[in-house]
Amino acid sequence: MKNIVLCFLFIFSFSNHYSAAQEKFTLKGTISEEKSNESLIGVSVFFPEAQTGTSTNEYGFYSITLPKGTYKVVISYLGFQTITKTIILTENSTQNFSLSDALENLEEVVITQNVESLNIQKPQMSINSLTSGTIKEIPVVLGEADIIKAITLLPGVTSAGEGSSGFNVRGGSADQNLILLDEATIYNSSHLFGFFSVFNPDAIKDLKLYKGGIPARYGGRVSSVLDIYQKDGNSKEFHANGGIGIVSSRLLLEGPLKKDKGSFLLGGRSSYAHLFLPLFDIDNIAYFYDLNTKLSYKLNDKNNIYLSGYFGRDVFNINDTFENTYGNSVLNFRWNHLFSDKLFTNLSLIYSDYYYGLKLNFVEFDWVSAIKNFNVKYDFKHYLNDKFRLQYGLNSIYYKFNPGEINPTTPTSGINSFKLTDKFALENAVYIDAEHKVTNKLSVSYGLRFSSFLRLGQNGLNIYENNQPVLFNEDFKIYEKAEPIDTLYYKKSDVIAKFFNLEPRLSFSYLINSDNSVKASYNRMSQYLHLLSNTSSPTPLDVWTPSGKYVKPQLLDQYAIGYFKNFNNQNYSLEVESFYKTVKNRIDYIDGANLIANNAIEQVILNGKARSYGLELLFKKNEGKLKGWLAYTLSKSEQQTKGKTDTELGINNGKWYQTAYDKTHDISVTGSYEFNKTWQLNTNFLFQTGQPATFPNGQYVYNNISVPTYNARNSDRLPSYHRLDISFTYTPKVNKSKDWQSYWVFGIYNAYNRKNAASIAFGQNEDSRVNEATQLSIFGIVPSISYNFKF
């Protein structure tokens, strides 16, 4: 650790010395969209003569230090008009830019990442960016644009199955993804068990998915980071946009609090298909609603404040016997401060809450579980010179876990009140990241994160003989729960377990020429939270639990290498990456594990390890009437849980077995074709190897009861998954004398009516008494229509 710190100090000192040896000045400013004053993320600020440049950060700020002189600066952002300006740099100065829409008509602004040439040079790899406009063009089920469904069309990203929650990245599980909305953690990203995502595309400004080479400023998960930023709102004039679909509608309002200084954004969505169910004598109810809000205000040239929030709920009611409510709530206050021309800071105070409620009227009880956290983050971005940039900061997260609470709903209920033991934890981290342009061809990004996790005191901790909460029965060759020998009680201020981890990060890019580069990366990450789930995809009922005395944190090591190329004046691009990663302390469950309302979860958990490796390809066509991409992933994802002794079997006899999210082949083709300004065709095709499963391979009869026997864990597969989606967008001719704009989307999901298997159940036919397999398919062909408007 000491040597690493000294290395950073040496680089810092050398960079400052190098900068001081020449007469240099700093150019800084913000870049925004002209019509709305919305800050733009990732705008390229390039100086052709100096062959150097920078880009705007998450708040539209840029800073670059150059030798004294006269420069031509090119400000470029796809979807906007490029600005070229001559600047005489003889002193530190501020230059703000406003970019106007490059389209002649009044269609929606398409926001994209940096120009491709700079992406080729940057050391960051394994990053994908999607825009709100791109997401809305992708055909989806029931006509609702969906961020989570869109990212599953990217290489290395798969869904857990049709109608399931979450997504899997490079063979990892859904709980290994860190999902951030304006820096706040989202614990469940799905509405209606995966049919919709919790993110309203109208409210989203920028989205980045980090699959590898993850910067040191991120931590807490070992698979990926999905970083989403909401729009700030229009500070120039009031606008509204929304859409009306078959099962849901949405509306977004934005406008100035004070012109050019403050803005508000308020967006809401709701589904309403349940309102029509009584017409068909159906008593069931299933709907969701959510709310996005944001307030932004510019105090002065050096200070900006933001207050953003999200609230969402899903409600299910089946014949008034079963009622289920769950959802996320987040609130974030942020303060941007500019200490100097080179030092930008952001302080965030964040609250995040995930709630799950279940009411079973037929047994007369309520079940409630939740996870809450309070997060303080302070981040610094130090623009030392045009070749060296530092990011550093710290954060501290306090967790409260409510694993479950049961209460009777009537005086006659046979259920007694029961509360599982609350758990508490404190996670801290400090980090430093450096982005260093070593030569014109070699750029390096390196950093270090130091994280700690303190499992705080709780009201009752089981103690086991030899600290073994799970025992292996040598006679029956099965795992059994150990009986506690004692129970200890702690104050909340006590520390019952603590973990410390160093997490180095390194990535580099070598520029072969202006259109070709090779990149490589390594990162280590720690994950201190675990999602308890014995299903192949997460459900709202799954419960998060912290690392502690019997559950160790997961530790990831990931290596990646890639080749990146632009073709035909950047109209086409190719990305090829290969990755290998290992995860220590990946939890597994003994056969027959009960995870619901279990106050001693350590009795059914075993620690194992996981690995995954693969090859990813992404070929994109970026310009022209026909645009889109082809993504292909060839990969393997496996897990191993060995016994502690030679006679202990472990899981699957201690051998490697496929994880539930292993997909050998994953192909997606996404395209859009603009016939004219009125009609556009959007389509995507998906093919995935079937999801691993465990099928019975025989049966025996015991006391007149038929008992099935099973193959090795996850040694079978569901049938391969594939489907074709098509949509047409109709945009009426715009009347420039009117503010109202609109377009229609006509879609067909699963156009050839493929009956994809969500699961296969095995049982005995009641009539013939013959064993049979029954396939469950959720969607066949689904047509949709939606009307979208803007004024």
Image (cartoon, rainbow, N blue to C red):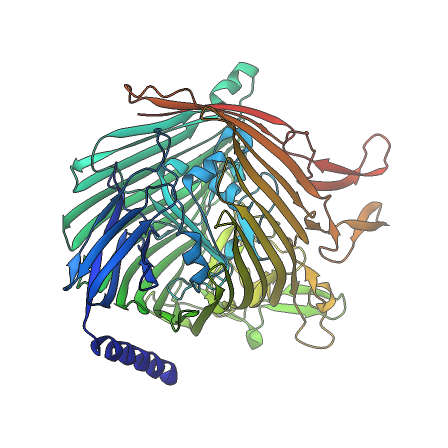
Q: Is residue 680 or residue 361 the one in the foreground?
A: 680
Residue 750's spot in the image, x, y percent? 63, 32
Q: Residue furthest top?
A: 279
Residue at 19 percent of width and 53 percent of height: 95
Q: Is residue 661 visible?
A: no
Q: Is residue 392 left or right of residue 557?
A: left
Residue at 20 percent of width and 77 percent of height: 20
Residue 325's spot in the image, x, y percent? 45, 37
Up/down of 397 relative to 769, above or below? below
Residue 538's spot in the image, x, y percent? 55, 48
The quadrant in which the C terminus is found is top left
The quadrant in which the N terminus is found is bottom left
Q: Is residue 700 left or right of residue 548?
A: right
Residue at 27 percent of width and 19 percent of height: 737
Up/down of 708 relative to 751, above or below? below
Residue 744's spot in the image, x, y percent? 46, 23
Up/down of 524 relative to 625, above or below? below
Q: Is residue 389 or residue 426 the one in the foreground?
A: 389
